[in-house]
Image: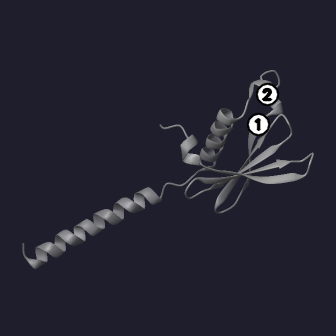
Amino acid sequence: MNKSHFILVFASCILLLCSCSTKVAKQTVTAEMAMEGVSNYCHREYDWSVAEDNPSIMGVMMEEETDSMYQVVFRSYTGALVNFYVNKVNGETRLEEYVPALDVKSEVGTINLFDYLEQK
């Protein structure tokens, strides 16, 4: 293998690796994905049976949007609110619970939104 052939093969490998990594990095979270993922999470983690007769006592709604995140809120039948702060780039989501009656706010944890999206 001569030097010019080696350089050509090496450059081709670098271009191939760079093009693969940019395709993966460009997957971003849309508002629809944020709503779907949070809704799926809430339906798995919270008891919705109390809302069977009155569905309006619980729900998931889109709130604020910035350049980097979506805020989606789950409202429980107890009056508690769980704020989901979804990172648009990587799907990392921070959960913060707020109980208005007690004026208590607490960090609940984190999830990855992509774990709660349906595979299509």
Tag of residue 59: 1
Residue occupying image coordinates x 23% and y 67%: 12
Mark 2 and mark 1 in contact? Answer it, CB < 8 Å: yes
60, above or below 24, in the image? above
Q: Position of residue 82 (x, y in %)?
A: 76, 46
Q: Position of residue 86 (x, y in %)?
A: 65, 53
Relative to residue 30, is residue 54 drawn left or right? right
Tag of residue 25: none
Residue occupying image coordinates x 86% and y 39%: 79
The crowding category of the residue bearing disc 1, from other C-alpha atoms within 10 Å (few below 14, some 14 to 19, many at least 20), is: some
The crowding category of the residue bearing disc 2, from other C-alpha atoms within 10 Å (few below 14, some 14 to 19, many at least 20), is: few
Secondary structure at badge 2 equals helix
Farthest residue to the right: give it.
101
Report the front residue among 4 and 81.
81
Type of amino acid under label 1: Gly
Farthest residue to the top: give it.
53
93, above or below 117, in the image? below
Q: CA distance from mark 2 to mark 1?
A: 8 Å
Residue occupying image coordinates x 90% and y 52%: 103
Type of amino acid under label 2: Pro
Q: Position of residue 30 (x, y in %)?
A: 59, 50
Query: Mark 2 highlights which residue?
Result: 55
Determine which quarter of the picture holds residue 8: bottom left
Farthest residue to the left: give it.
1
Q: Position of residue 109 (x, y in %)?
A: 68, 51
Image quarter in which the N terminus is found: bottom left
Residue occupying image coordinates x 54% and y 55%: 28
Relative to residue 83, is residue 8 drawn left or right? left
81, above or below 10, in the image? above
